[in-house]
Amino acid sequence: MDDKITSFFKFEDLRVYAKSVEYSRWLVENIGEPSNESAKTLCSSFVNSALDIALNIAEGSSRDKSQFQHYLKIAKTAIRECVVYTAVANKAGLLNDEANEQSRELLMELTRMVGALIVSLQRGGYRTRTGATEEEPHLDESDMSFGTQFFNELPD
């Protein structure tokens, strides 16, 4: 018997979705208290970009494969935005150096995971309709090594 619990909303079963939600939660817990209007705007934009990662994964999962790939590429754009916000927040004192490194590591992991899912969709290994395989691809060492390559090669 399969112990895997599936949700009504299939995107909730995706590890990359769970990781993106976790990143948003981590960010809210680790970003400093904004001291002025500029810092508040920065924090708000940063959190919105982090949420956009999960939102685009969720929205894309309800579409056909090519549309899902499109939404995953938009999620990668949100990841890149978060990389920039991480650097700016660190310079502004809203993220200390340790949190800066943690954010970058989490964002690199999300980039690899989203890239692996895009590749899986391109290869036909992931289907979004019932009756077909709906598992997210497992990341092995070869996926990890080429994650950055996909990040650079995929059109925006």
Image: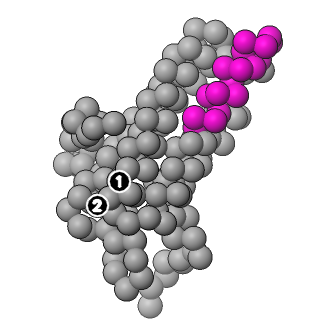
Instruction: Read off the residue under disc 1.
Output: 69
Q: Left or right of 110: which side holds 103?
A: right
Q: State which region is magenta.
A: 34-50
Q: Position of residue 97 (x, y in %)?
A: 55, 16
Residue 43 drawn in magenta: yes
Q: Quadrant of residue 50?
A: top right
| Residue 135 visible somewhere in the drawing | no
Query: SS for tag 2?
Result: helix
- Residue 130 shows which numbered tag? none
Q: Which is nearer the eye, 30 or 125? A: 125
| Residue 68 visible somewhere in the drawing | yes
Q: In the rendered structure, which amino acid carries the disc numbered 2?
A: Leu
Of callouts 1 and 2, which one flags the residue occurring earlier in the amino acid sequence? 1
Residue 148 drawn in magenta: no
Q: Position of residue 20 (x, y in %)?
A: 53, 47
Mark 1, residues whose alpha carbon is within 10 Å: few (<14), some, or many (≥20)? many
Q: Quadrant of the C terminus?
A: top left
Q: In the rendered structure, which amino acid carries the disc numbered 1?
A: Gln
Report, in whole angstroms, how far the alpha carbon at label 1 lies from the one at label 2: 7 Å
Q: Left or right of 150: which side holds 129?
A: right
Q: Residue at x 51, y 16 (%)?
A: 87
Most frequent secondary structure within the magenta stretch: helix
Q: Residue at x 46, y 43 (%)?
A: 75
Instruction: Read off the residue under disc 2.
Output: 121
Q: Quadrant of residue 152?
A: top left
Query: SS for tag 1?
Result: helix
